[in-house]
Amino acid sequence: MDAFWSVTAYYIDGYFIPNTLKRQATGGRDKMVANTDGSFDVYIQADSPGKKGGQLAPVGKAPFTYSCFFIDGARSILRSTGCHRRCRRKRECCAGNAQSEGDIPMIRSSIFGLLIAASLSSSAVAQEAKDTSGTNPAEITRTLSISNEYRFLLGDEYYNQTLLRYTEPFFDGKVGLRLTLPLDATDVTGDDEFGIGDISGKLSWIPYVSRHQAFILSTEVYAPTASEDVLGTGKWVAAPGITWAYFASPEVIVAPAYIHNLSFAGEDNRADVNRGDFDLYFVYRPHGERWWITSDTTVSYDFETDATPVSWELNFGRNLAKFNSGAALNGYIRPGVGVGDDRPYNFNVEVGLSLVNF
């Protein structure tokens, strides 16, 4: 026979899926037993189909995609990449979503009546191409979040900040706009103060992304909207930044970033802002799990005061719920510690909830 077909599964970032069978693809060149109607069943799942028969295309329990190839060696090729990524019915034909090159008279023998039996495990039924953990800096999705951070300052004072944030993606997720409303409280003046902090808007753009790396450019602008002097800078501040995200493996992201905060207008009697922040961000998100860990180390240099604040925060996040629409509800807790004589605080702890990709 001049033609053959194959099915290959991948993690959503393009890597092959390790499995005990050491098989990355299955197809017409494998030994398979046809059904009575001449079709073949291919089970794209983690576990063996057992007595059901058919051929197993092994995957893990993490999100995945797959490609189907139908090749007529003499004349043409039919390829369907990522077809039926959310297979729910037992029998779905990959050819239904395929794009052909040329005239393909291929449905003339049982091999081209191939039916995919996507009997997925419960955790893989609603496979998604997007990362809904909110930990990938190269994924811009619609997000609504609320968080609260309590800082134990160097004396007996405190600073508490509640952030309401909304992110809207544009241009297929290549551009994003994030708005932040801070509600702050502190006793650094000796009396308790509470009110609105400096509202900000952040524009992000991803000019380049590949399987292994991405570059993200951003600019955040802070407006002097604080209701009390102690809750803001009294200045208009621009904070352009650049982030390089390196996808070390399907489970690990390393993303160093540099952000420079510079005031350009505002009250003359308030101190100018001129500070550089180097941030080293690390993500560990194991496949098939609903939890993740991030590490965030920030080293700053204040050009106005010649100070070098350093802090380290460790985030423990978990998916709390997933919805049929593809949205996810996540929660996290992030303790942190200040380092050195110029540390911004002794300790801090932040908790938050986010609705992602709704």
Image (cartoon, rainbow, N blue to C red):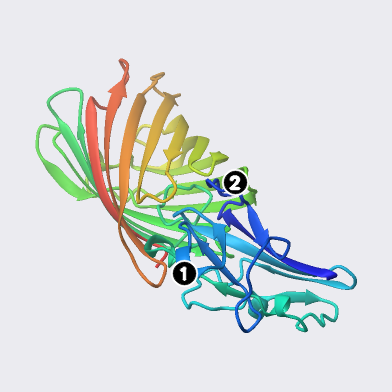
**Image coords of residue 144 (percent x, y):** 34, 61
Percent x, y of residue 268: 38, 37
Q: Position of residue 73 (x, y in %)?
A: 86, 67
Q: What residue is pinned by disc 1? A: 119
Quadrant (top left/top right/bottom left/bottom right) for the N terminus? bottom right
Residue located at (53% from left, 40% from top): 241
What's the residue at 46%, 32% (across, down)? Answer: 279
Report the side of 80 relative to 317 (left or right): right
In the figure, residue 65 lies in which quadrant? bottom right
Residue under label 2, please give it: 22
Q: Tell me the element at label 2.
A: loop
Judge whether residue 160 can be spotted in this image.
Answer: yes
How far across and down, in percent of the image, does residue 236 sit?
Answer: 42, 45
Question: What amino acid is at disc 2?
Answer: Lys
Q: Is residue 135 above or below residue 309?
A: below
User: Is 247 or 125 nearer to us in this picture?
Assistant: 125
Q: What amino acid is labelled 1 in the image? A: Ser
Can the viewer see residue 163 in this picture? Answer: no
How far separated are the C-alphas under marks 2 and 1? 20 Å
CA neighbours of label 1 inside 10 A, class few (<14), some (14 to 19), many (20+): many
Q: Quadrant of residue 99?
A: bottom right
Residue 294 drawn above or below residue 39: above
